[in-house]
Image (cartoon, rainbow, N blue to C red):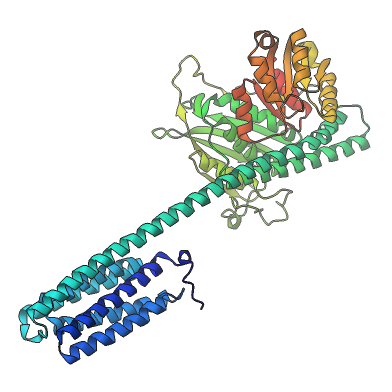
Amino acid sequence: MQKNTNNTNTFSLEEKIFNTVSFWCVVAMGINCLLNLLLATEFIYNLLNITIFLIYVYFYYSSKVQGKFKTLVVPFAIFTVSILTALWFIGGGLNSDIPFYFLLIILILFFILPSKAGFLFISVLFLLMLSLVLIELYKPELILKLLTEEENLLHKINAIFISMLVYYKLLDTVKKQYDLDRKQLKENNEKLIKYTEEKSRFLANMSHEIRTPMNGVIGVADLLANTELDSEKKDLVNTIQISGKRLLTIINEILDFSKIETGLVELNNHPFSLSDCIQEVFKIVYPDFSKKALQLRTEIEDDVPDLIFADSGKLTQVLINLIGNAIKFTEDGFIKVKVGLYNKFNNQLKFEVIDSGIGIPKENLKKLFESYTQVNNPATIKSGTGLGLAITKKLVLLMGGNIEVESTPKVGSNFIFTIDFKNIKNPDRQKKYNFKDINIESLNISNDSLSTKIPLKILVVEDDLINQKVIKKTLESLGYNIDIANNGQEALYKIRKGLYNLIFLDIQMPIMDGMETITQIKSNKKLSKNSEIIVALTANVMSEDKEKCLNAGMNDYLCKPLVRGDIIGMIQKWFG
């Protein structure tokens, strides 16, 4: 062990208090020894005080060595209590300075001993004091009075003085430690905030840098898939699409998990239609669903309101994750989505995603929602990070609910989760949605020219040439002739010249970015009039980025990489 007296900040609070107490024990016994010599008290009494003084000197110097506290505290407590007990009988009992030191040692032990040991030791001390008082009351002859009244008075004054000094030093030590801890906590909090902000920026930049080239890969593959190809080329394009989708899923899961782990995900509760939310989920999962011989069933209880106040984005993500999993592990049969009230008094909705898939063995159910975990079964191993259900659980907990699973191998699984919500009492909008009326086939994206059904004048504001080509080709395949602007400045020039029904506006661009462009549009009546619907087009996927775009005045938000279905869905949503 090395001494470390220069940097006291490395000592714990208990070590600092113990060092302070040991020092004042040395001072107190030193003064007692000096008083005894001056007053010429009994030799045995002087010898006892000098011995105690020297032992406390040892405790004090030992306490200056970091790490010795744990080995010293118990011997110190036992020694001090033993000495005080002996001095009680020798020094005059209640009518002496010893009761002051007993009370002082109780306070000291309260600070320096662990909770359980401290409570036990202090209880023993109180019982010991009570025993000593009873002995003095019923056997007063056992108490020796070696000091005169004057000597006793001087010792009492010394005890009071020492006690007050020790109390002061204890409070001062605790206050200094409190101030130090508060300062360190503030510094750590500032570092954590800075780290979180840096990580948030890093995740946003990584997302943007990865998704921008991914938009070219997935977008071009999607365009190729909608052209006339022989079976071999279709198989190759399909392989590109599947691989791109898997890579995108992995990127999304890693980013989502990182955001959740660092506390960057917050609830964004707002009024929305539950039926519209679920219909949107069905549209997203339809391409995967339509490739299998599956039935999609839905069921909703009569007392479930349609217009609710909750976080539609996170509910959508949870439903997509669970239905996507059900599709992945169900080759034929059905997938059923049920919605009901879980708790009418606490306003909780209950969702069930039921499938007739391969099921999950009972021994694997407990670890199903753990991070980086996949069911270790050759029949169930699929590609992925093992983060999907971990993210799902964290999102459900964030929404005030819980999630569990019931499953039987070769029969199917039922994922059940709840979320908190508030009912919006608006009779005009609180319609009942009949899930039985959902026409799954209507979710299919037609290859017919959309421009004949929904004629639009469209402007794409995008600086990346590859992304321009992908979006241009996609819209041309739907029958649209589009205008392209390389930045916000060019976009404003084109908007001044004429009306655009739909504008796809990229966020990160040179010269003038998307946020500055939307600000200019919304602050100018003519520009605003010539811009019917503005959709943010960006590789940033952070929830705060989406909120920033919508708050700035954009009507909607699309994340790269884009496929044909995303663009069709956006056109149908606003103009269908």
Q: Residue at x 63, y 14 (%)?
A: 523
* Image quarter hosting the C terminus: top right
Residue 5 visible to the viewer: yes
Q: Is residue 154 left or right of residue 481?
A: left
Q: Residue at x 84, y 37 (%)?
A: 238
Q: Residue at x 65, y 21 (%)?
A: 554
Q: Is residue 319 left or right of residue 489?
A: left
Q: Residue at x 31, y 60 (%)?
A: 171
Q: Name above or below for residue 202 compared with residue 279.
A: below
Where is residue 178, by image quadrant? bottom left
Residue 284 in percent (x, y) is at 69, 31
Q: 448 or 393: nearer the eye?
A: 393
Residue 276 in percent (x, y) is at 59, 24
Q: 489 or 91: nearer the eye?
A: 91
Residue 305 in percent (x, y) is at 48, 25
Where is residue 63, by image quadrant? bottom left
